[in-house]
Amino acid sequence: MVSWLSHKQKVVSRSSTEAEYRSVAAALADITWLQSLFTELRFPGSIPKIYCDNSGVVLLASNPVLHSKTKHFELDHFFVRDRVQQQRLSVVHLPSQDQIVDLLTKPVFGAMFLKFRSKLMVEPISTISLRGDIKK
């Protein structure tokens, strides 16, 4: 599942790590709601993984020490870090070149396009034409 949302920011972030950490916290809030729903439906679940291309976010999520640079997003920091420490969440680093969602959000060309397209299991159909099934 992909958590993707576009809206006007309510807060100005001071760094890309802060902005992405806020996104991880927002995704975790959605995951928490879904886990609650699945529990009510008696649907078995597993430990969710959030993939992030910012290594600073991954390090902050697993680091129990509060840094002075995190004071601007302290609530988000505690929210995510507590779930990671309780082993109820895993934040995993995934390099930018492996982010499949980039196919939907950024211009991707050549080999990267073909790589992402095959991972999404979207294959070209060679028999499609603008004329449809009409034959001469």
Image: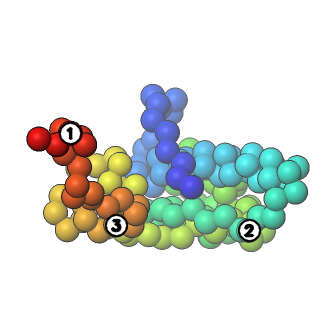
Q: Quadrant of residue 77?
A: bottom right
Q: Is residue 62 left or right of residue 92?
A: right
Q: Nearer the viewer, residue 62 or 47?
A: 47
Mark 1 neighbour density, 10 Å: few (under 14) some (14–19) many (20 or more): few
- Assign a secondary structure to mark 1: loop
Judging by the rendered image, the residue that carries numbered circle 1 is: 134
The residue at 60%/49% (across/down) is: 27
Q: Position of residue 42 (x, y in %)?
A: 87, 57
**Left or right of 4, for residue 119:** left
Q: How is the image coloured?
A: rainbow
- Viewer-closest of 9 and 64: 9
Residue under label 2: 46
Disc 3 target residue:
118
Amino acid type, mark 2: Ser
Q: Quick check: can you spot residue 76? A: no
Which residue is drawn at the image coordinates 22% and 55% (left, top)?
127
Q: Residues within 10 Å of mark 2 (few under 14, many from 20)?
A: few
Viewer-closest of 1 and 134: 134
Q: Residue at the far left: name it.
A: 136
Q: On the rendered image, what quadrant is the N terminus found in? A: bottom right
Q: CA distance from mark 1 to mark 3?
A: 30 Å
Which of label 2 and label 1 is nearer to you?
A: 1
Among numbered discs 1 and 3, the one appearing first in the sequence: 3
Callout 2 touching callout 1 (CB < 8 Å)? no
